[in-house]
Amino acid sequence: MYELEQISDTCYYVNCPAKVGIYVPDGSSAYLIDSGNDKDAGRKVRQILDKNGWQLAGILNTHSNADHIGGNHYLQKQTGCPVYAGGIEGAFTKYPILEPSFLYGGYPCQDLRHKFLLAQESETSEFTAEGFPKEVEVISLPGHFFHMVGFRMPDNTVFLGDCISSKATLEKYGVTFIYDVGAYLETLEKVAEMPGAVFVPAHAEVGQDLKDLVAANREKVWEIAGFLLETCRTPMIFERILQAVFQRYQLTMNFEQYVLVGSTIRSYLAWLKDNGKMAVAFDDGLLLWQAV
């Protein structure tokens, strides 16, 4: 874990739970693509930079989930490096309490205020700010999170963030986090046709052709959607729908899984409703979902 892997003359990644990319354009200045899940991850990444004589010039965040920005605070405090994040992702990175609050739908209890959902704050700049490496292309990849992006380097190495999961992850967890199901499907199509020399997903194997993996992620979306429609053949409240999902995919309920899977299933239900496949009714103070 935390081994440095070289992709090309200028691109590397640190093999850790959420891969940290490294772009070294001139042999001495290094830009990170994300920063790991916590202070310890940031420290290990900095040790790799120091060992190779690289000076941290900035952190390019794909999105603001805590496992991708967790090392920001430590690295920014230690080096003064800028952190670049776009749109809503920048706001969540600067004010990380927004992530568990958004997932829970209110003020998060202490069970949700931990490093896996609540990173330490870091100051951010937009991708248009002076100092951002202009030769790096920012690629819009929404769906998994609000304004998630990927980065294409000049040598055509593409860092993809969380837009696809490995087949092992899909098999193990069943329901991976998605904020906007429609946008996620569009992003999958985009990635399937995307040109690139090497692709680096944060939670899947690095490769040159991701079409099979994209297809597996797409099939999982339709599988979950189909299960929800079958489950809601009769009117059902959300908590019963969520219970059925946990039983179907043999998931263990705790606060973290409740908000992550629960938020995702709400997004599926909203997508199905917006596409005319699900209807709602209000009865005796209950919101009921039913397949059309």
Image (tube, grey):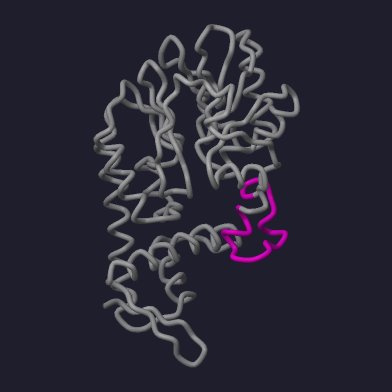
From what the image shows, is residue 48 above or below residue 258? Answer: above
* Image point (59%, 42%), residue name: 90
* Image point (60%, 9%), residue name: 52
| Nearer the observer, 1 or 165 | 165
**Which quadrant of the view contains residue 102?**
bottom right
| Nearer the observer, 74 or 98 | 98
Question: Residue 227, position in %: x, y?
Answer: 31, 67
Question: Residue 70, position in %: x, y?
Answer: 64, 38
Q: Is residue 77 left or right of residue 94?
A: right
* Image point (36%, 50%), residue name: 184
* Image point (72%, 31%), residue name: 74
Task: Let me know if residue 223 is in the magenta part.
Answer: no
Question: Residue 275, position in %: x, y?
Answer: 29, 67
Q: Which residues are magenta?
A: 99-117
Q: Quadrant of the C terminus?
A: bottom left
From what the image shows, is residue 34 above or below residue 219? Answer: above
Q: Is residue 159 left or right of residue 3?
A: left
Task: Let me know if residue 102 is in the magenta part.
Answer: yes
Q: Quadrant of the N terminus?
A: top right
